[in-house]
Amino acid sequence: MSSKKYILGNWKMNKNLAEITKFFASFNKHLITNNKIKYGFAPTYLGLGLASNLKKGQTFIIAQDVCEQEEGSYTGQISCKQLKDYKINYAIVGHSETRKFLGCTDQMVNKKVKVCLANKITPIVCIGESLQQYNKHQTKDVLAKQLKTIFNGVDDSKCIVAYEPLWAIGTGKTPTLKEITTICTHLKKFVQHTPILYGGSVNENNAIDIVTLKNVDGLLIGGASLCPDKFNKILKEVNKWTRK
Ligand code: PGA
């Protein structure tokens, strides 16, 4: 089990440069120092440079996606090499919104993971079941199948997995605590040495209960990560918990 807790914010297509500046002006006032917590934010590609300049302390900056190709004729895409210019060492891959709106598949995620690792970028691999699959009790099988394709020919211990039920993203609904820990424990059978995060409607009120569950190594937070006070509150509680 990973001894660190990852608390990561996915800003999606939110915040322009002025808003990023405002965010860090507030967030940086209450930075915590704790080597048992790793925390960072994923702005859009256009915000990576500014966010990297404004971040302080332990905060690190994450890309929201990366192209599975090294370079070439891939209009609209960004390569690992280009992320490296901004000293980006983490990239989210296979987020459900890139699957839904940009046609990303498990096979593509497998390639993205490989290109990330070849460029010393840690991929944060998102997997999750649909509401229909959840209702049919297919979650465990769906996730196992995703992991099999995505980690084919890959050293998974160099990756991070984020379990994000599609029906929980941005909906205010979450699985029960028992379901989250059961699923994350199931995932550990396939990826023993890989940190497993939970994502989907995590907020400042439910974060501490989820992140302290057995076999949950952290959180991937969308909506609640946009507000510095909410994110700081989550970090403060996790900080307190790690020092108990
Ligand atoms: P949410 O998003 O916290 O707003 O549900 C999570 C995610 O998409 O990673």
Image (cartoon, rainbow, N blue to C red):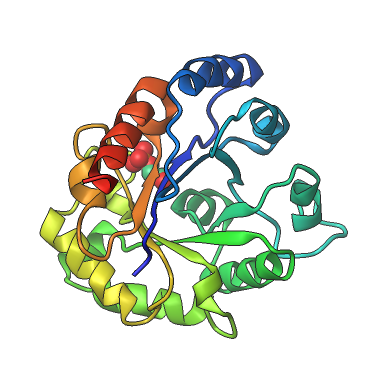
Q: Is residue 13 above or below residue 216?
A: above
The quarter holding residue 164 reads bottom left
Q: Position of residue 205 (x, y in %)?
A: 20, 33
* Residue 230 located left or right of residue 105: left
Is any atom of residue 156 visible in this view? yes
* Residue 222 located left or right of residue 62: left
| Residue extending furthest toward the bottom | 153
- Which quarter holds ligand 1? top left
Q: Position of residue 60 (x, y in %)?
A: 57, 41
Picture residue at 55% right of the left edge, 83% below the top: 152
* Residue 79 located left or right of residue 57: right
* Residue 126 located left or right of residue 230: right
Closest to the observer: 142 or 196?
196
The quarter holding residue 136 reads bottom left
The quarter holding residue 163 reads bottom left
Quarter of the picture holding the N terminus: bottom left
Q: Position of residue 123 (x, y in %)?
A: 57, 61
Q: Position of residue 241 (x, y in %)?
A: 23, 44
| Residue extending furthest toward the right | 72
Q: Is residue 92 above or below residue 184?
A: above
Picture residue at 37% right of the left edge, 28% below the top: 232
Picture residue at 88% right of the left edge, 59% below the top: 72
Is any atom of residue 171 visible in this view? no
- How many discs appear? 0
Q: Is residue 154 above or below residue 165?
A: below
Picture residue at 41% right of the left edge, 64% below the top: 195
